[in-house]
Image: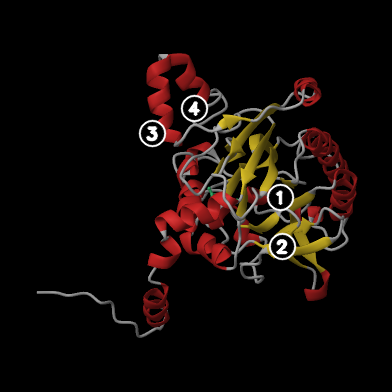
Amino acid sequence: MSGPGFVSLESSLEKHLPDEELKEVRRILYGKDIKQLSLPQSAVDAAFERDFDLQGYVFEASPEQLRPPRVARVGLIQNKIVLPTDAPVLEQITALHKRVGEMVEVAAMCGVNIVCFQEAWTMPFAFCTRERDPWTEFAESAEDGFTTRFCQELAKKYNMVVISPILERDEIHGGTLWNTAVVVSNAGNVLGKSRKNHIPRVGDFNESTYYMEGNTGHRVFQTQFGKIAVNICYGRHHPLNWFMYSTHGAEIIFNPSATVGQLSEPMWPIEARNAAISNHCFTCAINRVGTEYFKNEFTSGDGKKAHHEFGHFYGSSYVAAPDGSRSPGLSRTRDGLLVAELDLNLNRQIADKWNFKMTGRYDMYAEELTKAVQHDFKPNLIKE
Ligand SMILES: NC(=O)NCCC(=O)O
């Protein structure tokens, strides 16, 4: 059942497993028990009235003698599009600003310091259609577009870092398009942007029709609340992409995504979590939610019938920690805000325990990779 009929793995386990067994299943599936974060009643009420899932968790670290805890609260927002995909472009964008704006207000009530939205949050995920019109009209300047200005207002109002993944129009380079996350500091300044490094060519993810592989490398943004990076969607299938953000010092790596049940759901709980473990950092996986309908049929190049829908975006956003623990996921079917309090001291504590940065044979890999990318590479393959 890859569609909207199944609410979440967590609710299914709770419904069907006896308490003692559930505890063991959780231990094995989710790692150490993480505490629920107590959220203000005003926030709980507002989420109920505004009809979205609100969950909060705490990832603690051990007390240290020389360092005080380094606590940051992150907010992950997943949402459906608001208007039909054939509504006028500006109305669609404005309706999404309004919806996400009211969710950010609740994030502020919960004390969130850094909020991240889903991939291409101001638009339907229309790249499946391969049509240019009107979808390229959703593209905006990362520096001073309508949406960036909106995020700057949110950032200033709530003293919150805002990560805003958009379709970028780059006027300096001939109006080219990019899939870009804009990072706005809590003072409301555009700290910078980070472009999607890996562009999918799978199923209906026809994004290569619109934009190319990003050219901003593995930027890490020093914010007041910690060093953050943004590994956009398809980059989560590339362990070296996570690794490079971590190599540049990222303490929290956000993964704003848009992916559907039929394609990737069994991979979803593993990839960002594995990245948190192998890189000694926190990761935040955010997926779009809902089913989007497009007026013109499109095909998937697989001999099957043309269709109007991409499939169900299954939400299930979650946070993973370097010790292998993770939060439950948000709903598969509803808009949601996941608030997580992270003690960033956990990163070094786990690094000191497991030593992956020390035991990693990066010099050996660097040398072998340098050879492997040459056209005349000879694999180290021994035959009888
Ligand atoms: N948006 C995007 O890159 N999706 C690709 C499909 C996937 O990574 O599951």
Amino acid on which the number 4 mark rests in the picture: Leu
Instruction: Name the disc covering residue 222, or none.
Output: 2
Residue 207, picture quadrant: bottom right
**Is residue 305 in view?**
yes
Question: What element does badge 3 sit on?
Answer: helix
Q: Position of residue 191 (x, y in %)?
A: 79, 63
| Quarter-of-image position of residue 56 | top right
Up the image or down, 206 lies above or below 36; here it is below
**Crowd class of label 4 (few under 14; some 14 to 19; many from 20; radius 10 Å):** some
Asked if marks 3 and 4 touch (Cβ < 8 Å), the reply is no
| Mark 1 to mark 2 CA distance (whole Å) | 23 Å
Mark 3: is the Cβ under 8 angstroms from ligand 1? no
Q: Is residue 332 in sight in this rendering?
A: no
Residue 57: image x %, image y %?
61, 33
Tell me which residue sits at (38%, 82%) in the image. Answer: 371
Give how far apart the Cα atoms at labels 3 and 4 are. Answer: 14 Å
* Amino acid tagged 3: Ile
Left or right, 366 with reference to 224:
left
- Find out if the beta carbon at label 1 lies less than 8 Å from the nearest ligand 1 atom: yes
Q: Dot 4 lies on which element? A: helix
Which of the two discs, 3 and 4, labels the residue nearer the N terminus?
4
Q: In front: 41, or 371?
A: 41
Which element is circle 2 on?
A: strand
Label 1, label 3: how many angstroms apart (C-alpha)? 34 Å
The picture places residue 95, in percent across and down from the top left corner, at 85, 37
* Mark 4 lies on residue: 9
* Quadrant of the image occupied by residue 53: top right
Please name the residue that numbered disc 3 is placed on. Answer: 28
